[in-house]
Amino acid sequence: MSERSTTLLEEPKQAGTQLPARPGPISLPLGILRTARPRQWVKNVLVVAAPVAAGELFTRHTFIQLALVFALFTAAASAVYLINDARDADADRAHPEKRHRPVAAGQVPVPVAYAAGALLAVLAPAAAAILCSPMTSAVLTAYVGMQLAYCISLKHVLVVDLAVVASGFLMRAMIGGVALGIPLSRWFLITTGFGALFMVSAKRYSEAVTMAATDGKTGATRALLSAYTTGYLRFVWQLAAGVATLAYCLWAMESAGLGDEGLLPWRQLSMIAFILAILRYAVFADRGTAGAPEDVVLRDKALALIALVWLALYGLAIADW
C-alpha cells in the first residue's frame, strides 16, 4: 500500500480523536440518570416529615402514598437538574469539576437534556393530580416553577436566592401532609422553613470561607457567592438556627398541660435532642466545613446518634398520643 493511501486511512482516526464521543445506547440513559443527581434524592425523604410529625405513618395506605409522592418529587427535582445543566452547559465546560457532568462532557446532548427535563416537569404534576390530589399537583407545579425561575434569574438576586433554595426543602416537608390531607401545624412549617434556611446559609457560608481561603481559585461559580460577606452569611445561619429552635420548642410545648403527655413528656424531652443536633451541626458550619450537608448528616457519628435519640423520643411521643 502506498504512503498516500496509508495516510488517508489514518486521517479519519486522527480527526475522530478531536470530536466529542457520541452517546451510545447505554451511555445516554446513564448520563441522563447521572444528570438527575441520584445522590440528591435522599433530600426527598423529607416528604415523610409531615406524616411523622402528625403520627400518621403506620398504615399501608400512608406508606403507598408516600412512596408515590417520593417518586413524583424525585421526578420533578430531576427535571430541574436536567434543564439547569442544559442551560449551564457552556459555563460548566470551563469549570474544573463541573466539566465532567454528562451534559457538559457531551454524554447527554443539550436538546436531549432539555427534552427529558421538560417531559418530567410536565408528567410529575400531571401524575400527582391523577394519583394523589390537585393540591399535591399544585405544590409540585409551584416547586418546578420556582426552581426553574431560580435557574433562570432568581439565583442572581441577593437573599431571594437563599429563600428559594430553602423553600424547596419546605415544599418537600409539606407535600407528604398535603397528599394525605394532614393539617400542617404553623410551628411545623416555621421549624422546617428556618431549619432549611439554616442549612442552606451554612452551606453558602462554608463555600464562601473556602473561596476566601483560596483567593477564589477553587473554581466556584455559584451566582452571588462573592457578593455575600462571610459575616453576613454567618448572621443568617445563626438567626435561622435561633428561629428554628424557638419554633420547635413552642411546637413541642403545645401539648403541655393538655393531659396528653403520657408516661413522660416525650415531646418536650425531644427538644433536648433537637437543640443538640442544631448545636452539633453548627460546629461544622462555624468551621466552614458544611459545604456538603448530606456528607455532614450521613458521616458524623455523633450527629447520627443524636438524630436516633430524637427519633426515639418523638416516636415515644407519638405512641403516647
Image (cartoon, rainbow, N blue to C red):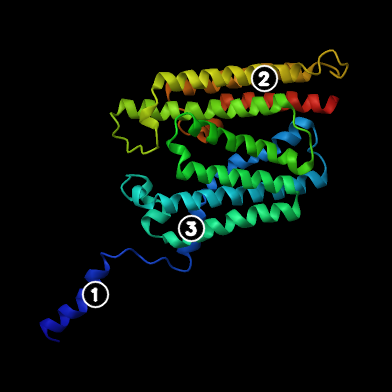
Which of the two discs, 3 and 2, labels the residue nearer the N terminus? Answer: 3
Residue type marked 3: Tyr
- Percent across and percent down for residue 151 are 47, 44
Query: What kind of element bears circle 3?
Result: helix
**Residue 12 has which mark?**
1
> In whole angstroms, how far apart are the C-alphas of marks 3 and 1?
31 Å
- Asked if the residue under mark 2 is in contact with the one under mark 1, i.e. CB atoms within 8 Å, the reply is no
Above/below status of 197 relative to 91: above
- Residue that extends furthest to the left in the rendered view of this protein: 3
First in sequence, mark 3 or 1: give its number: 1
Q: Which residue is mark 2?
A: 247
Q: Is residue 125 above or below residue 286?
A: below
Amino acid type assigned to the residue bearing label 1 in the image: Pro
Q: Nearer the viewer, residue 14 or 138?
A: 138
Q: Quadrant of residue 297?
A: top right
Answer whether residue 108 is visible to the viewer in this image. no
Q: Which mark is residue 114?
A: 3
C-alpha separation, residue under disc 1 versus residue under disc 2: 67 Å
How far across and how far down the image is residue 264, in percent? 82, 16
Counting labels gives: 3
Residue most extreme to the right: 259
Secondary structure beneath disc 2? helix
x then y, percent, for residue 206: 43, 27
Q: Amino acid at mark 2?
A: Ala
| Mark number displayed over residue 91 | none
Mark 1 neighbour class, 10 Å CA radius: few under 14, some 14 to 19, many 20 or more: few
Q: As displayed, is residue 7 above or below residue 143?
A: below
The answer to whether residue 321 is seen in the rendering is: yes
